Image: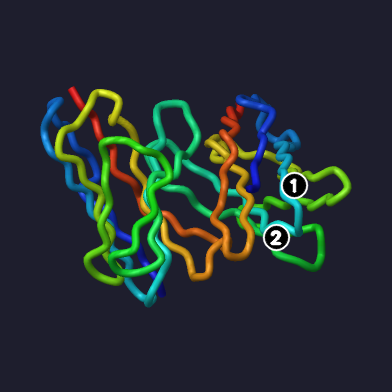
Amino acid sequence: AQSVTQPDIHITVSEGASLELRCNYSYGATPYLFWYVQSPGQGLQLLLKYFSGDTLVQGIKGFEAEFKRSQSSFNLRKPSVHWSDAAEYFCAVGARNNDMRFGAGTRLTVKP
Amino acid sequence: SQTIHQWPATLVQPVGSPLSLECTVEGTSNPNLYWYRQAAGRGLQLLFYSVGIGQISSEVPQNLSASRPQDRQFILSSKKLLLSDSGFYLCAWSVPPGGGTQYFGPGTRLTVL
């Protein structure tokens, strides 16, 4: 079965700084990869997903992620963080006929 | 377009009381449906998923149960709540056969006192 590791429990960045959230997955075949964002007390919103094709994926709110098969990674990036980006971010891995597994999440704090 | 609803939004229940949380999906047919629990400061724990009416798979043994009486309705229940059942409950749906994007509802905050 697939699994996901998000090594960073909590990250703090200054507003306007760049951001990279790490995600490593374990799966024997080509995975489906996702990033979700959760604001406090809310459900999860899909930021972006990778199924196949171009390994650099663009998402909503200015986020992007790059699939690196050799490193089993799918890191999320944003060139300039806004205060409204403060939230919990979840990486997930799925596969056809198999359901998703989520990482433990990374909490992002944005300093003014 | 598809929408997913959960109610109630918040719930405070005494230990030992019953529970019923409801999730409904609109704008799609025969979805896969999921119940997750998120304890404070924790990730998502998959509790149940369903690929069709009356078909429920349990991921974690506990005092909760799930039912799918209609195609787009998913219910999470308990006969007697425990303190450890407190958490944020999320319902989600996806297009079969699974593994693809899951779309989440707004969640229910359950506090057991």
Query: Quadrant location of the C terminus of chain A?
Result: top right
Chain of the residue displaying label 1: A
Which residue shows up at 25% across the image and 57% down it? Answer: B67
Q: Is residue B80 left or right of residue B55?
A: left
Image-quadrant location for residue B3 = bottom left
Disc 1 vs disc 2: Cβ atoms closer than 8 Å? Answer: yes
Q: Amino acid at mark 2?
A: Tyr
Which residue shows up at 74% across the image and 33% down it? Answer: A17
Q: Which residue is mark 1?
A: A74
Locate residue B4, reporting x and y percent.
34, 62
Number of numbered discs present?
2
Q: Amino acid at mark 1?
A: Phe
Q: Which residue is mark 2?
A: A50
Element under label 2? Answer: strand
- The answer to which of B58 and A9 lies nearer the viewer is B58
Locate residue A29, reporting x and y percent.
76, 57
Which residue shows up at 46% across the image and 26% down it? Answer: B41
